[in-house]
């Protein structure tokens, strides 16, 4: 095979290799087809020759994208943008949208050896690129759910390479997929192809290893077939795909406006673009060449062409490509089946470490190898309906490519871009900022790229996707909680009235003047309603600020306050990714209430409030009183049934009372089960959330199946729950430190 391809030198060190090393290189060789390898090496050498002498004369064949195929955030009115956004959210709510991340590259230019997605640019939250993107996916899912009332999922496909697959998988597992369901995060690997020398020979990286490189982000189309990704999309019902690169910190995954625009236009392929900052800016340009849509690299365009202006003074070729694309699944399938082999091979001349004839590793000081790449945007030419969508650079494009010290696209510029965006969002929402002396900081609505915002403000993607404001962050008395509480009160008193209007024991005693039981029943109903409102409206234990006393009692220095010293049950005092407060142990963020809740049990739709540290005992008391009322009411309903000669007459006489009794019976069973389960869990000193999700909770998943670090015995657990009102530092209980009141 190697001789056929003219690459027999690959095995020149065969005699020196161990059995394991021989197996490794044979495995690598087996992945290469002789004909493909021969053609690849010939094409690489020929392309490199053309690359060095290319004239790149495309100017006379270029024309801008026609206006009717361009959408614009800046030029469109609010109603049109709203229409596109609504269409996008509708498609998301129907499960027809997925996102695909191109993450095959390492952070070499950033000075790190791990994948770019794992990079932390220095935000106050210390979030990585992967976490920011995962949280944006969660938020846009929530927006679609809020809009259309149905739970939906946006599958996240991540294309990695041989270098990034393992670290990425490990990173996601260690971080519990950042709150996403693991089955909806699908990682797959793109092909690796040999690096070739200028003589057309494959380069050896080691004696037993060929120097390989990913086949560029255009390797996506082959990888979709190799890994059966298109079939997976079909099974999930995905029809539209948003494809983007990992290094853009401002990227909006599954952007509803972009998705909606493309769907509305009937496009099979689309690209987000930004206005070039200046004519010579080194970004590719989306345009048409010979009537076909392409991205032309800046180096292929003559300066005089780059400087051409339209009637309004704008750059004629100013649609800068930001590697942010829309595809239909049908279009991807067609590309994979018909056009993948026709994609252009791009030449990258690189310094490739190699072993010389003596087997010594050599790190070249000048380029010595050819890496062939395909680009994801080279499929535009095959589109039947291509559209471009212009977005604002300051809102959607800030790449991370170079280490600090470079003039552009560094961790510092990326961090500034995101914090400046969040600062603008806060100002637009009516926020004002104070300095250390509590004096107002004058607002600044525009900043240069090398300028920090006047105040540091980071907004979690879980709170806001594109700066939208939510009334749900503040409780609205006329929201769903008002409706639920009103319905509860009406139902309670209607059933009570039915019991008094029919010939029940309550009515009989009232008519005979024996008022003790009727009055007691009404008072008990009133107590249950008052307890309902108390539990429903009281603070369940919201965590509104960092607990400085907790940090002090645990002996945590400010610079390491997120860590507890390592023990056999090592945990983190983590900062909430939603509201950015430090979470005490046993607390959890409630997506409905938009707050972290101490000793979180669950969010109860019946009371439209969380059940947590401050209202849990009142919730159990309410259930007990409600159960007594319901059982008493059921008994009274039974006493009111009257006899009749026929079933029809009996139903006509007792129909209303029977309906009330049926409702009371169902509610009695529900409350009985709830009360029993809560008393059982309280006796174990565990919560509903901990009981259901212990395998995902950081401080419990490492404990044994029957181990509960908070259990002090049933009697002490019940005493502590009902009789001790002081807040408990659960970290002390967990580590068996100190003497707490339990």
Image (cartoon, grey):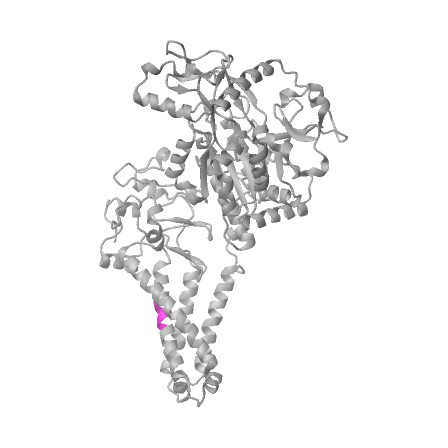
Q: Quadrant of residue 341?
A: top right
- Foreground: 310 or 385? 385
The x, y position of residue 367, in whole percent, is 50, 13
Q: Position of residue 19 (x, y in %)?
A: 30, 21
Location of the N terminus (image quadrant): top left
* Residue found at the far top of this picture: 358
Q: Which region of the structure is painted magenta? A: 624-628
* Quarter of the rendering containing residue 714: bottom left
x and y percentages locating residue 318 in the rendered image: 67, 28
Residue 514 colored in magenta in the image: no
Helix, strand or loop: magenta stretch: helix
Q: Residue at x 25, y 44 (%)?
A: 735
Q: Position of residue 36 (x, y in %)?
A: 50, 24
Residue closest to the eye, 498 or 156: 156
Res. 553 visible in picture: yes
Q: Is residue 436 visible?
A: no
Q: In the figure, residue 443 lies in which quadrant?
A: top right
Q: Is residue 249 left or right of residue 378?
A: left
Q: Is residue 426 above or below residue 402?
A: below
Q: Looking at this view, name the residue that lies furthest to the right.
A: 311
């Amino acid at each position: 095979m190697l001789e056929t391809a003219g690459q027999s030198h690959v095995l020149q060190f065969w005699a020196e290799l161990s059995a394991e090393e021989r197996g490794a290189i044979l495995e690598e060789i087996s992945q290469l087809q002789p004909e493909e390898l021969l053609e690849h090496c010939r094409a690489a050498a020929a392309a490199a020759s053309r690359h060095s002498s290319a004239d790149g004369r495309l100017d006379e064949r270029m024309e801008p994208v026609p206006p009717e195929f361009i959408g614009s955030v800046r030029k469109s009115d609010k109603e049109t943008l709203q229409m596109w956004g609504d269409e996008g959210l509708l498609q998301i709510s129907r499960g027809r949208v997925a996102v695909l991340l191109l993450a095959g590259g390492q952070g070499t230019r950033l000075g790190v050896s791990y994948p770019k997605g794992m990079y932390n640019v220095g935000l106050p939250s210390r979030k990585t690129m992967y976490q920011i993107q995962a949280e944006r996916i969660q938020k846009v899912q929530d927006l679609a759910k809020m809009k259309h009332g149905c739970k939906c999922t946006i599958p996240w496909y991540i294309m990695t390479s041989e270098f990034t697959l393992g670290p990425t998988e490990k990173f996601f597992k260690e971080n519990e997929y950042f709150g996403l369901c693991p089955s909806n995060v699908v990682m797959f690997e793109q092909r690796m192809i040999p690096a070739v020398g200028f003589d057309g020979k494959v380069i050896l990286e080691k004696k037993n290893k060929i120097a390989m490189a990913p086949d560029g982000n255009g390797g996506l189309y082959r990888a979709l077939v190799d890994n059966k990704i298109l079939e997976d999309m079909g099974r999930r019902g995905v029809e539209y795909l948003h494809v983007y690169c990992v290094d853009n910190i401002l990227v909006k995954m599954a952007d509803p406006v972009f998705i909606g625009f493309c769907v509305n236009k009937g496009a099979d392929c689309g690209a987000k673009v930004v206005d070039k900052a200046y004519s010579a800016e080194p970004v590719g340009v989306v345009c048409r060449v010979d009537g076909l849509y392409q991205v032309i690299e800046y180096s292929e365009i003559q300066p005089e062409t780059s400087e051409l202006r339209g009637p309004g003074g704008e750059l004629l070729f100013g649609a800068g490509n930001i590697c942010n694309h829309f595809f239909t699944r049908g279009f991807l399938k067609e590309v994979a089946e018909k056009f993948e082999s026709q994609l252009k091979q791009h030449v990258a001349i690189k310094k490739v470490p190699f072993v010389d004839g003596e087997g010594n590793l050599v790190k070249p000081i000048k380029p010595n190898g050819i890496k062939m790449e395909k680009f994801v945007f080279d499929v535009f030419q095959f589109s039947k309906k291509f559209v471009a969508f212009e977005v604002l650079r300051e809102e959607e494009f800030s790449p991370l490519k170079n280490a600090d010290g470079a003039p552009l696209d560094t961790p510092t510029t990326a961090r500034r871009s995101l914090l400046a965006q969040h600062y603008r969002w806060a100002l637009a929402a009516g926020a004002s900022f104070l300095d250390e002396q509590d004096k107002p900081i004058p607002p600044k609505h525009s900043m240069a790229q090398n300028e920090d915002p006047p105040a540091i403000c980071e907004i979690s993607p879980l709170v806001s996707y594109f700066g939208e404001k939510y009334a749900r962050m503040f409780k609205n008395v006329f929201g769903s909680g008002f409706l639920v509480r009103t319905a509860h009160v009406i139902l309670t008193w209607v059933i009570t009235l039915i019991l008094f209007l029919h010939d029940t024991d309550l009515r009989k005693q009232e008519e005979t003047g024996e008022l003790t039981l009727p009055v007691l029943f009404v008072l008990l109903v009133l107590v249950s309603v008052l307890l309902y409102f108390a539990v429903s409206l009281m603070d369940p234990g919201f965590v509104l600020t960092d607990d400085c006393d907790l940090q002090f009692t645990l002996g945590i220095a400010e610079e390491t306050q997120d860590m507890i010293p390592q023990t056999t049950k090592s945990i983190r005092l983590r900062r909430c990714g939603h509201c950015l407060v430090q979470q005490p142990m046993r607390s959890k963020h409630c997506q409905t209430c938009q707050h972290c809740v101490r000793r979180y049990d669950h969010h109860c739709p019946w009371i439209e409030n969380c059940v947590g540290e401050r209202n849990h005992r009142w919730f159990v008391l309410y259930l007990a009183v409600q159960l007594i009322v319901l059982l008493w009411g059921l008994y009274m309903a039974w006493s009111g049934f009257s006899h009749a000669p026929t079933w029809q007459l009996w139903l006509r006489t007792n129909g209303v009372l029977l309906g009330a009794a049926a409702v009371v019976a169902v509610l009695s069973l529900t409350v009985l089960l709830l009360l029993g389960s809560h008393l059982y869990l309280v006796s174990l000193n565990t919560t509903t959330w901990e009981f259901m999700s212990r395998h995902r909770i950081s401080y419990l998943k490492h404990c044994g199946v029957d181990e509960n670090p908070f259990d002090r015995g049933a009697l002490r657990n019940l005493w502590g729950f009902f009789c001790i009102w002081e807040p408990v530092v659960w970290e002390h209980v967990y580590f068996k430190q100190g003497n707490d009141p339990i």
